[in-house]
Image (tube, helix red, strand yellow):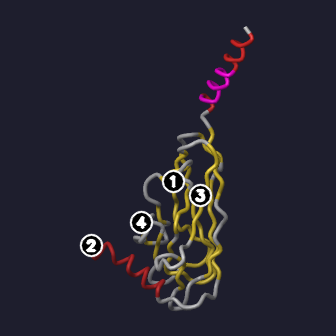
Amino acid sequence: MLRRALAPAVLLASLLLHAGAASALSTVTLDPSRTTLLLGETLQVGIYADMSDPIVGWGLDLLLDSAHLGVVGAPQIGGSWTGVASQDGDGLAGAAFPSGLTGTVLLAVVTLSADGLGMGEVGVEITGGDATEGFAFDPDFATGFDSVALPTPLAITVVPEPGTAALVALGVLGLGARRRG
C-alpha cells in the first residue's frame, strides 16, 4: 500500500530530476475572487498555469503569511492532474499521463482562512534544489524543465466583522462622551 501511495511522487521526482535545459515558458497566476476578507472568512485561491509546451508534471511551494492567513484542509488538485505527494508536504504537485497538457490549466485550489487582522500575503515558489518542484516537459515532445514565470504574492487584507467594528466605534464614542461629561 505504501509503495502504491509513493509511486506518483517517485515518478514526478524522476521526471523532474532527469530533465535537461529550459526551452519554453509557463506562466503561473493566482485567481482570488476578492482581496479583502472579514476575520474568520475563507477564500478559495485558484492556481493556474499557462503552458506553452506539454507539461507532464509540476510541483510548487505555497508561501503564506501565517500571522494573518491559514490553510483550510489539503489543496484540491485540478481535475486534469493526478495529485502526488511532495517532499515538503503542502500537497501542491500533480502529474498528467500518458501525454502532457498545454494551454491555461487549473493546477490546484487552496482554501485560505482569515485568521488575524491586517495585511497578509499568499503566493507560490519553486525552491532551488528541490527535485519535486518545477514543471517537467512531456518527454515525447521535448526534454527539460519549463521556465516558469511566478506571480507576485497577493496581498489579502483581513478586516474585523462590521458588527465588531461598530461595537468598537460605539465604545470609543462612549469613552469620548464620558470624558466630556
- Tell me residue 100's x, y (percent): 52, 82
Check the image and name the residue furthest to the top: 181
Disc 3 vs disc 2: which is toward the camera? 3
Q: CA distance from mark 3 to mark 4?
A: 17 Å
Q: Which mark is residue 111?
A: 1
Residue at image coords 65%, 50%: 35
Is 171 part of what is drawn in magenta? yes
Q: CA distance from mark 1 to mark 3?
A: 11 Å
Could you tell which of marks 2 and 4 lies nearer the N-terminus? 2
Q: Callout 2: few (<14), some (14-19), or many (20+) C-alpha neighbours within 10 Å?
A: few
- Tell me residue 175's x, y (percent): 67, 17
Task: Please state which amino acid type lies under the numbered disc 2.
Answer: Leu
Indicate whether 139 appears above or below 77.
below
What residue sits right under mark 3 in the picture?
Answer: 122
- Tell me residue 129's x, y (percent): 50, 79
Task: Please state which amino acid type lies under the numbered disc 1.
Answer: Thr
Task: Please state which amino acid type lies under the numbered disc 3.
Answer: Val
Q: Callout 3: few (<14), some (14-19), or many (20+) C-alpha neighbours within 10 Å?
A: some
Residue at image coords 71%, 17%: 176
Question: If the image is split into quadrants, where does the N terminus sit?
Answer: bottom left
Task: Please state which amino acid type lies under the numbered disc 4.
Answer: Gly
Residue at image coords 60%, 34%: 161
What residue sits right under mark 2 in the picture?
Answer: 2
Is 99 part of what is drawn in magenta? no
Q: Secondary structure at mark 2?
A: helix
What residue sits right under mark 4 in the picture?
Answer: 89
Magenta region, main secondary structure: helix
